[in-house]
Amino acid sequence: MHFKTIGKLFQATGFPAPHHPLFGLTILEQNLQVEITNCKQVQSISCDFYIISLKNLKAGTMQYGKTRYDHDHGSLFFYKPYQLIGSSGTQLDGKGFAIYFHEDFLMGHTLFHEIKKFGFFDFEANQALHISPREDQIVWDLYYKMQSEYTGNPDEYSKSILLSHLDLLLQYARRFYRRQFIDRKPLNGSTMTRFNDLLDSYFERGVIIDQTLPTVRHLASALSLSPKYLSELLKQETGKTTIELIHLKLISEAKSQLTGGDKSISEVAFGLGFNNLSYFSRLFKKETGMKPNEFREHLLN
């Protein structure tokens, strides 16, 4: 079931109509069971708008995209428009909240252009933000400030203040995610090892048999991570994104093959999955400062 408006979603879930058609807030009470009324067979929904929610499940399951959520911890979730959100028999442990906002509500504010830069809207649910008690207090303080503006008498400043608090919440989330990456550094290191092993398999076991380059999406899927989360995790660990690490690995392998053996440059390029020789040459020069033929001639002199 797809909801084009916040009002329709509120109506289906039994909440009062939102104060603004493009912005809504709800408190999720303890033991709340959320079901889509008159649509019990519906197991997933999508919306035209963003949702940020804080919740800790004590029963039931949630699914975000194709990923099932492990509900052992209280977490912040960031849902983007048109992303499938599934749930079954969910019950909350303690109080939570949800913030709903349409992209059009952001018009005239810096968030209209900046919202897509908050990469955690592309994370899967099992990569949700698990917040500490101190962070929980910060998040609730910002929610209550938004609620005060949302339920008060609106004036010409209300929308700007609301969006300022929302922007601050997103900035804090970015900081908290960075803390989470650091806290989970041993896990990150393990992921980096698995990432390198997976890339090695492309060359050592001849995985590239259909002459295609390893992609971020394929590697992330093999590691059971979303592409955006994998890239953020690797950047925290190495300072480089997933695609940058893929390129480094490809060029390292290309240098090895150009150094030893009698393969032509085109054979090396196509063997590594490049279907465009000029692209291979440009990437090789970007990483090494030399074109492949210049690199090979340099070795012979």
Image (spheres, helix red, strand yellow):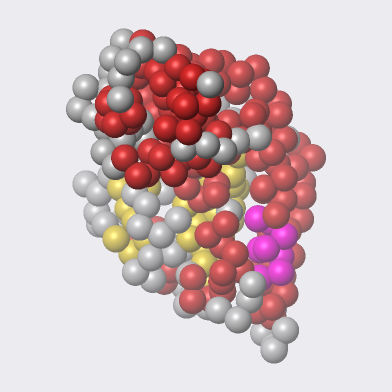
Image vertical order of residue 111 relative to residue 119, above or below: below
The percent position of residue 118, horizontal first and vertical second, equals: 58, 54
Residue 165 located within the stretch drawn in magenta: yes
Horizontal arrangement in the rendering, residue 48 relative to residue 24 (left or right): left
Quadrant of the frame with the N terminus: bottom left
Q: Residue furthest right?
A: 134
Per the rendered image, the range of residues in magenta is: 163-170
Horizontal arrangement in the rendering, residue 52 relative to residue 292 (left or right): right
Q: Residue furthest front?
A: 301
Please, what is the dominant secondary structure of the magenta stretch?
helix
Image vertical order of residue 288 relative to residue 184, above or below: below
| Residue in the image at 33% along x and 64% along y | 3
- Which image quarter: residue 198? top left
User: In this view of the protein, which residue sits in the foreground, 94 or 69?
Assistant: 69
Image vertical order of residue 229 relative to residue 32, above or below: above
User: In this view of the protein, which residue sits in the foreground, 83 or 15?
Assistant: 83
| Residue in the image at 53% along x and 76% along y | 105
The percent position of residue 282, horizontal first and vertical second, equals: 44, 44
The percent position of residue 63, horizontal first and vertical second, equals: 38, 38
The percent position of residue 138, horizontal first and vertical second, equals: 77, 49
> How many numbered circles does the render carry?
0
- Which image quarter: residue 178? top right
Residue 45 located within the stretch drawn in magenta: no
Q: Residue furthest bottom?
A: 156
| Residue 153 at least partly seen | no
| Residue in the image at 41% along x and 36% along y | 216
- Which image quarter: residue 166? bottom right
| Residue 137 at least partly seen | yes
Image vertical order of residue 4 relative to residue 257, above or below: below
Horizontal arrangement in the rendering, residue 43 relative to residue 239 (left or right): left
